[in-house]
Image (cartoon, grey):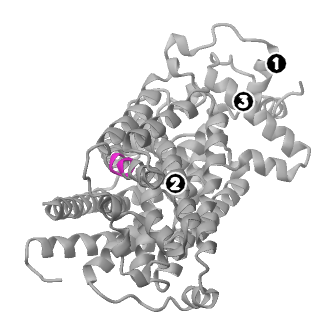
């Protein structure tokens, strides 16, 4: 075996090699992945190199095209048809790309997760606030993911118990290999089925001229109840940029072993994920828009989230089946990525091993948190009569409301010259990032304040 | 680090060589080493608290509304 880059660097610099610390299982597995990356780079095999380095970005973006997001997009389409929200989805994915690129970069440069860095760099108070936000929003979102699996399976007359068991079995199966690469590739394979929403959109035969018109003009702008509009606005933002994505992509980039040399591929990964996410998200809205003339009356099954059944009545059984399978996939992938982000965050905050490259016996907290949070969410969806559509939409809104703090710390980390060296944010990127924080804060606050004032009868909708 | 998390003896020389492909601070033992604390300026701390209180208040409003609509 030829000597690696670290050894060559030490030889070139004439430094004395210090005794190497004891190797862990995590080190061995990660070094194996890095050896393949080194070999691909040395051999000039660009496409293979890209194949080896993609993953965290696509997983974060398609993971966020999750059950509640797709239900939210379809609900928006069913209520307003094609129009403002279609290009708005694209805008929110551009926002997500900006935020996720920062996470990837910080993870690749520091080799540490977001939770660990916030806790150590800014103190335990802010670290635990961040982890607390994440735990809360992840639990609510995970409930919504199981809801999505339940809705999808209900179309095939399969009950909630199977939905809960399926989600949990997937979590245990993907974690069982003790290898990040294995987890990543299984979830990537599953995530490609997010494309089912594109198939569903094609099957409802949308008017292509109307789609193009909406995308270019952001019109027609939706009318009707301001509060409903604000709910859908905030939930669309929350359907695209969320705290768990930030935790996940930074931790996964570090766990995968990305380095500053891999930033170009990391950016391609993030942009590819965002582009696919935007296409599939728009497709869910277009499929939902097929129901716009039906006044939403036909989606009342399963507490207002019966989109697959409604679509099958309007456009035939095949499209209903595809949409149902898409919801199962969206929920399943998100259960895996969101429970992983929870495991990373808890492990990082309590200073325990948090890597898929560790065997479960060596990273008990990481694996136990992964399973526990999924288990709690799975149990909750077994409660009969739960308002599924409302849970899904509000999960996204909560993510939007809590996101600004997460983003501000992300920006601070990405500007920390002591940690990031020459890879800090540019001045232009900082300006864009601050506009995003203000936009997200306003989106969440507008719905939160308006709906609260209506609830306590201080204003009327 | 837990004793059980360490390879007591290197599996073989090849494994030792492979580790050279990691950057020095990519080893698990380095990743778990704390980074130094960043001194937050008083103004930054105030802004962070304002943002924290803001999201908690708005979050409480959303949760209150959600449960009100249920009942």
Q: Does residue A120 appear in this view?
A: no
Percent coordinates x, y for residue A44 in the rendering: 90, 49
Which residue occupies 37% across, 46% down? A122
Residue located beneath label 3 in the image: A31
Q: Nearer the viewer, residue A287 or A285?
A: A287
Alpha-carbon distance for marks 1 and 2?
41 Å
Q: Nearer the viewer, residue A202 or A312?
A: A312
Q: Is residue A255 above or below residue A420?
A: above
Q: Residue at x 55, y 73 (%)?
A: A282
The residue most toward the right is: A43
Task: Give me the chain letter of mark 3.
Answer: A
Question: Disc 3 and disc 2: Cα gap in Å?
Answer: 32 Å
State which tag comes first along the sequence, 3 or 2. 3
The stretch in magenta equals A139-143
The chain containing the residue under callout 1 comes to B
Secondary element at image label 2: helix
Identify the residue position indicated by label 2 in the image: A330
User: Residue beneath label 1, please?
Assistant: B14
């Amino acid at each position: 075996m030829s000597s690696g880059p670290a050894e060559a660097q030490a030889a070139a610099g004439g430094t004395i090699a210090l005794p190497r610390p004891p190797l862990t299982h995590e080190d061995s597995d990660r070094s194996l992945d890095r050896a393949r990356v080194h070999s691909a780079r040395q051999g000039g095999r660009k496409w293979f190199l890209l194949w080896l380095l993609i993953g965290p970005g696509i997983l974060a973006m398609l993971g966020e095209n999750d059950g509640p997001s797709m239900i939210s997009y379809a609900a928006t389409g069913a209520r307003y048809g094609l129009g403002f929200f279609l290009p708005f989805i694209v805008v929110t994915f551009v926002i997500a790309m900006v935020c996720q690129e920062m996470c990837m970069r910080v993870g690749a440069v520091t080799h540490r997760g977001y939770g660990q860095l916030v806790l150590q760099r800014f103190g335990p108070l802010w670290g635990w606030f961040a982890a607390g936000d994440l735990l809360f929003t992840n639990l609510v979102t995970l409930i919504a993911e199981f809801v999505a699996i339940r809705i999808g399976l209900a179309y095939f007359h399969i009950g909630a118990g199977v939905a809960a068991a399926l989600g949990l079995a997937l979590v245990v199966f993907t974690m069982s290999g003790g290898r990040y690469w294995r987890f990543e590739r299984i979830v990537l394979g599953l995530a490609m089925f997010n494309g089912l929403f594109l198939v569903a959109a094609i099957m409802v035969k949308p008017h292509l001229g109307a789609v193009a018109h909406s995308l270019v003009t952001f019109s027609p702008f939706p009318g009707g109840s301001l509060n409903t509009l604000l709910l859908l606005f905030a939930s669309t933002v929350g359907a695209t940029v969320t705290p768990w994505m930030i935790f996940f992509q930074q931790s996964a980039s570090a766990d995968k072993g990305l380095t500053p040399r891999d930033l170009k591929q990391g950016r391609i990964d993030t942009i590819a994920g965002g582009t696919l996410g935007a296409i599939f998200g728009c497709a869910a809205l277009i499929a939902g828009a097929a129901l716009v003339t039906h006044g939403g009356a036909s989606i009342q099954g399963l507490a207002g989230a019966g989109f697959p059944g409604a679509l099958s009545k309007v456009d035939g059984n095949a499209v209903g089946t595809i949409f149902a399978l898409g919801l199962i996939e969206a929920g399943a992938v998100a259960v895996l990525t969101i429970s992983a982000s929870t495991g990373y965050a808890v492990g990082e905050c309590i200073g325990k091993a948090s890597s898929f490259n560790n065997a479960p016996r060596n990273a008990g907290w990481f694996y136990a948190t992964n399973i526990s949070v999924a288990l709690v969410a799975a149990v909750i969806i077994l409660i009969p009569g739960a308002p599924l559509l409302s849970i899904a939409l509000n999960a996204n809104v909560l993510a939007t409301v809590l996101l600004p703090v997460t983003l501000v710390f992300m920006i601070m980390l990405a500007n920390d010259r002591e940690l990031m060296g020459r890879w800090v944010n540019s001045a232009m990127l900082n300006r864009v990032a601050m506009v995003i924080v203000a936009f997200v804060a306003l989106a969440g606050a507008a719905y939160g304040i308006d709906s609260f004032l209506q609830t306590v009868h201080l204003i009327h909708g | 680090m837990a004793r059980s998390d360490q390879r007591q003896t290197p599996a073989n020389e090849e494994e030792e060589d492979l580790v050279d492909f990691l950057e020095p601070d990519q080893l698990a033992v380095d990743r778990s080493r704390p980074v130094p604390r960043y001194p937050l300026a008083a103004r930054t701390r105030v802004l962070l608290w304002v943002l924290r209180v803001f999201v908690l208040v708005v979050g409480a409003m959303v949760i209150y509304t959600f449960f009100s609509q249920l009942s």
